[in-house]
Image: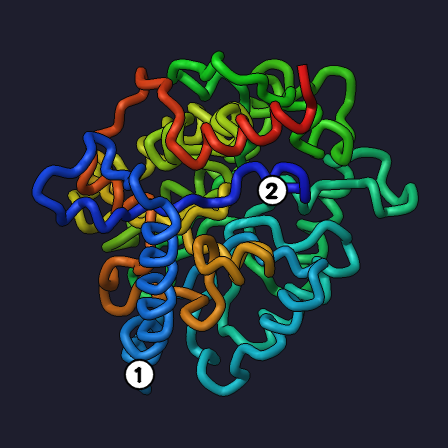
Amino acid sequence: MFDEMLMAMVRSPPSQSPLLQQANPPRDGFDRRNPRNHLRSVRNRCAKRQRNLPANRLYNCRSEAESPRVFVVSDLHTDYPENMAWVRRLSRAWHGGDVLVVAGDVAETYRNFVSTMAELKERFGAVFFVPGNHDLWCRREEGKFMNSLEKLNALLDACSELGVETGPRTIDGLGIIPLFSWYHKSFDKEKDITDVKIPSLEMACKDFHACKWSPQLSNNGVALALHFDMMNEMNHNAIKEVQTTSNHIITFSHFVPRQELCPEKRMLFYPNLPKIIGSDFLEKRLRSIHGNFVSGSACHLFGHTHFCWDSVVDGIRYVQAPLAYPRERKRRMNGGEDWLPFCIYFKGFTDKLSPAYWSDYYSENKREPKNTDLAPWVAKFYTRHTRRRGP
């Protein structure tokens, strides 16, 4: 999702505190007495968990049987050479009968997008894709596209030529349904942080400058989100067919369908992040698709925020498995490398994604959307920046 400025402000803090095991932990579970030891402990645990992941999560999902496995990854960002190298290191031998779901933000440039999708299609039996915001940036396209919708059409045409799926399909009893979406500010329903000066959305998020839209479409209201949601109507009949022919269904999008799938504002270095991540239209649409499926038979995959996530909300499993930026992976707090792509389905949905720091945290701690007391690392961040700017 993020440009460099926003990435620096939204980097993931520790989300599972050792204090959760203490006799009298603070109410929010964070160690204010010794934050350095806290952070070091979290990072060491994260590193250990990631080292153990390939054997636990990917290779044990291998099988020579005819049933396909379904893998998921989001936020490839292959404009970074390290990320493109990761794609090219994926095995050409293991995944010939498998499915890969790519939940948006493949690359900023059309050229890198096509190269990436071609690499993935050479490795997987079927590849599904929905666009993210970075995929629609026009700033480095040298005038090739009049606007972001024209670029979107070019990306979809390229997918068609490569054999990449952008519409609903049933594979061996599993329905896979891509959902187009875009965010809107009114998605954010939780109390704003007002005690510190927060940069504007236009300053923090390059979408407002790197994407190009017609005058009728704007990020200021719901027009863009509604436009992308209505694009799903062209797949209405195909979705109905998938519903009638599938035992399980996976829907997927780039953007976030529920605000609970993002940390609270007080936990974020950029507290206004929820205003540029999700869509109410998306949640309503995926619920209309999954409505007849019982718990354990429905899953929605998403991306965009770069927070690993795996939780069940109102009977639907929500999963985010981002590659993210190289800088984020080095901190071992966001994204993954050794354990991606994540195997989400093999003859049924697989075990819980791990690591999923924030969803793990909220499985133990109640969400407090009205609490605007900044987490210690956020308060420290804004205090430091206020001192730099001066009065």
Residue 9 visible in image: yes
Q: Is 149 rendered above or below residue 188?
A: below
The foreground one among 240 and 167 is 167
Residue beneath the point at 65% across and 73% down = 85
The N terminus lies in quadrant:
top right
- Between 6 and 387, the one lying in front of the other is 387
Quadrant position of residue 387: top right
Residue 210 percent location from the top left of the image: 77, 35
Which residue is drawn at the image coordinates 56% and 49% (left, top)? 104
Give me the residue at 61% from left, 18% from top.
Answer: 223
Give, as a three-letter code, the residue at label 2. Ala
- The picture places residue 79, in percent across and down from the top left corner, at 72, 58
- Residue with the mark numbered 1: 63
| Residue at 27%, 74% in the rendered image | 56
Q: Residues within 10 Å of mark 2 (few under 14, many from 20)?
A: some
Q: Is residue 316 left or right of residue 341?
A: left
What is the x, y in percent for residue 253?
Answer: 48, 43
**Visual colour scheme:** rainbow
Residue wearing tag 2: 8
Disc 2 is placed on an element classified as: helix
> Which of the two marks, 2 or 1, is nearer to us in this view?
2
- Viewer-nearest residue: 366 or 293: 366
Q: Earlier in the sequence, mark 2 or mark 1?
A: 2
Is 368 situated above or below 305? above
Specify the amino acid type for callout 1: Ser
- Mark 2–mark 1 CB contact (< 8 Å): no
Separation (CA) of disc 2 from disc 1? 40 Å
Q: How many residues crowd mark 1 within 10 Å: few (<14), some (14–19), many (20+)?
A: few
Q: Dividing the image into 4 quarters, which one contains the C terminus? A: top right
